[in-house]
Image (cartoon, rainbow, N blue to C red):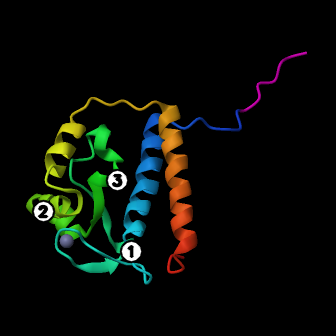
Amino acid sequence: MSQVKRKRKVRVKTYASLKNALDRVFSRWTRIRFADSAGMVRCVTCGAAKHWSEMQAGHFQKRHYLATRWHPENVHPQDAACNVFRSGAMAEYAAYGVNRYGMDWPARMVSLSKIPTKYTRFELQQLIEDYTKRLEHLEQTDTSVA
Ligand SMILES: [Zn+2]
């Protein structure tokens, strides 16, 4: 009797796909948590108001620094004009952060971002679960989010 190889039903997610999944849920959470009851949110660097779905999640310390890539104090709603075309509008971003978190915020984010950080697949999965729960909680309390 020959053995029949069974196809694996559950595909193991790659490290890159876990990072992408975490980026997606964290970005959505970041934009929705700042939205008002109508789903409108202000760009933290120019003040333009748009629906959260038209905003981006703008990083103060850039995304390639893993230590701050998914840090709530490092990522805020920004419109594409500031996040992309003005490269993050860093001077205004620093001013916003100082106002919100205190004088030491820019230096704190810079030094935190430089800490060499490596997440395991398990840790990425935990973060995805954590932010998925936070997002569900926001969406339950905010009726404007479809
Ligand atoms: Zn802006």
> Which residue is at 32% across, 45% downward?
69
Residue with the mark numbered 2? 95
Give the magenta range: 1-7
> Which residue is at 50% across, 80% downward?
144
Amino acid type, residue under disc 3 in the picture: Pro
**Helix, strand or loop for the magenta stretch, by majority:** loop
Amino acid type, residue under disc 2 in the picture: Ala
> Which residue is at 55% across, 73% downward?
141
Residue with the mark numbered 1? 35
- Residue furthest out toward the right: 1
Left or right of 55: which side holds 8? right
Amino acid type, residue under disc 1 in the picture: Ala
Compare marks 2 and 3 and give the one earlier in the sequence: 3
Closer to the camera in the image, 4 or 37? 37
Identify the image quadrant of the N terminus: top right
Residue with the mark numbered 3? 72
Closer to the camera in the image, 142 or 5? 142
Residue 5 highlighted magenta (yes or no): yes
- For label 2, being within 8 Å of ligand 1 is answered no
Residue 51 highlighted magenta (yes or no): no
